[in-house]
Image (cartoon, rainbow, N blue to C red):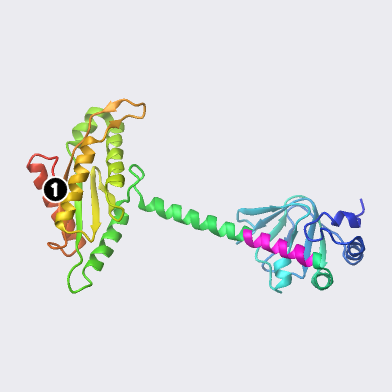
Amino acid sequence: MALVATDLSSTDLLRGVPIAVLELVLARCTPVSLSAGEMLLSPERENYHVYVLLSGAFALHFNSPGSPEVRELLPGTSVGEMSVIDATRPSAYVIAKVPSQVLPIHRDLLLSLIDDLNLVARNLLLLMTRWIRLNTDRIVLDQQQIWELSNHANVDPLTGLYNRRWLDNALRRLVEQSRKGERPVPLAVFLVDVDHFKAYNDSHGHLGGDRALMALGEMLKTTLRPYDFSARFGGEEFLVVLPNTDATVGHAVAERLRLAVAAKPIALPDGTPLPHITVSIGLATNDRAVTPESMIAEADARLYEAKRNGRNQVR
């Protein structure tokens, strides 16, 4: 079936263009057929045409022809505008997915249409804006995926708190910052340990133990101040970092957490209630320690002091 001018009037690039101009385009341009798998555009080849897709379907790939398909191009759309306008090679691979047909419009003809017809210029601007928006959306999606991967690498999957990997980096930075001035900026940390957790786990199973740790994680998220940080230190131990906090305030924050944990209901996923838990807490500040390791060691020593003195307390 022969191509006629009205066939072009529904394409994105030539929409609304007078029939006489469409007939001129047809007189100067010859449709080209491509087999399935044939490449239309490539970053390795110069491009001098905008291609209006007449039939079939094309796939757009970045990086390489074998990379995942980024977008499917269907009849009525066009490709090649960017490389034609800025006289550069295409930025992607465009490959026919099935037997397809395109109408190549040479750069010189396109530029003359832009000069003579506001409609073509407007349509081209809309097409390029659409491409820019799609590329922006892809960048945003890529950044979101990178953030999610990074976030997953730094978050404990059971409690949703930061993990030891994140903690090691963050605590070192905070300790260094606290030591920069003539007088140390107050910094406190405390270790939190679930009392008799092994017995709790043995009595109520690993699922019960997990629910207890999740409840503690929830209390750490909701009870601490907005600028405090908490991380799962290992097993049933958690470390809390309190910037700009001295021993007196740090003890008050830890005591508030201890009371909140003791009052927190715990239940299995089916609603079956479980016993409450209590925690022992050991506090350290940079008045006594000047490295992350020594602060944690001090907090650990005080934690064991709390355990020796009966548990469910802050030391």
Residue at 58% x, 57% y is 138
Does the magenta-highlighted stretch encompass residue 235? Answer: no
Residue at 45% x, 55% y is 147
**Which SS type dominates the magenta stretch?**
helix
81 with respect to 21 (left or right): left
307 with respect to 239 (left or right): left
What x and y, as percent, mark residue 71? 66, 53
258 with respect to 123 (left or right): left
Regarding residue 145, the answer to whether it shows in the image is yes
Q: Which residue is mark 1?
A: 303
Residue at 44% x, 53% y is 149
What x and y, as percent, mark residue 88? 69, 73
Give 92 or 274, whichever is nearer the viewer.
274
Mark 1 surroundings within 10 Å by alpha-carbon count, few (fewer than 14), some (14 through 19), many (20 or more): many
174 with respect to 59 (left or right): left
Give 10 or 50, whichever is nearer the viewer.
10
Residue at 86% x, 60% y is 31
Q: How many marks?
A: 1
Q: Please, what is the three-letter code of the amino acid marked with disc 1?
A: Leu
Give 32 or 186, whichever is nearer the viewer.
186
Does the magenta-highlighted stretch encompass residue 126? Answer: yes
Query: Which stretch is magenta?
Result: 120-133
Q: From what the image shows, is residue 95 above or below residue 122?
A: above
Q: Toward which corner of the image does residue 47 lie, by quadrant?
A: bottom right
Regarding residue 46, the answer to whether it shows in the image is no
What x and y, as percent, mark residue 110? 81, 69
Q: From what the image shows, is residue 57 above or below residue 174?
A: above
Q: Toward which corner of the image does residue 114 lie, by quadrant?
A: bottom right
Judged from the image, the secondary structure of the residue bearing numbered disc 1 is helix
What x and y, as percent, mark residue 120? 80, 65
